[in-house]
Amino acid sequence: MTLRTPLDPGPALRDAALLARYLDALNLVERLHRRLLDTIKDEFERLAIRDVNPVQALLLFNLADAEVSAGELRSRGCYQGSNVSYNLRKLVDLGYLHHQRSEIDRRSVRVRLTDKGRRMRDVVARLFATQAEGIAARGILDLSSLEEIVHALRRLERYWSDRIRYIY
């Protein structure tokens, strides 16, 4: 018979606690993403920006000065949604993106920000800078804490990526 101390709850209880905390983390990541979109939406309402939604604004922000194809947007992590073609077409129609067919592969379209797109990117960049300053000023997170969070999230992303590629 194995004796357990109060500090060692045993494997089954440890696994249940790990699973519960993991599920909490997953729920939090999803909620944080929705909250991020809400903060962008609130800023757009304050500035009376109505033609771009928060997902499209993040796409413009992440695109920055790059010129990429739709496939590259996803592989570079600039866009995580399944409807990238719709959002790209909408942003082109609204004048936020230039698009040009590839000379090599006519099926491929490359996109880059227009001046209007860069101005929208700047709006989002200012919002993020203000948020970062607010987080620091209120003592919510400091640089060290953010580095730990980013490091942990990158490890989790790598684990999920490896699982998708069947690398255990």
Image (cartoon, helix red, strand yellow):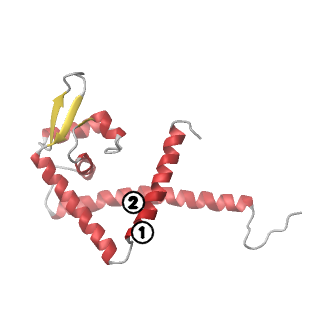
Give the mark toward the camera: 2 or 1: 1
Name the residue at 15% across, 50% down: 118
Amino acid at pointer 1: Ser
The quadrant holding residue 80 is top left
Q: Quadrant of the C terminus?
A: top right
Does dot 2 land on a helix, a strand or a loop?
helix
Amino acid at pointer 2: Leu
The residue at which mark 1 appears reads as 144
The front one of 84 and 99 is 99
Q: Is residue 31 above or below residue 167?
A: below
Total marks in image:
2
Pinpoint residue 148: horizontal percent, then vertical percent. Answer: 46, 64
Query: Left or right: where does residue 14 sit relative to residue 43?
Result: right
Pinpoint residue 142: horizontal percent, then vertical percent. Answer: 38, 72
- Say whether disc 2 or disc 1 marks the residue closer to the N-terminus: 2
Q: Quadrant of the N terminus?
A: bottom right
The residue at which mark 2 appears reads as 32
Name the residue at 35% across, 61% down: 35
Q: Is residue 118 above or below residue 108?
A: below
Q: Is residue 76 above or below residue 104?
A: below
Pinpoint residue 107: horizontal percent, then vertical percent. Answer: 24, 23
Name the residue at 36% across, 57% down: 34
Does dot 1 land on a helix, a strand or a loop?
helix
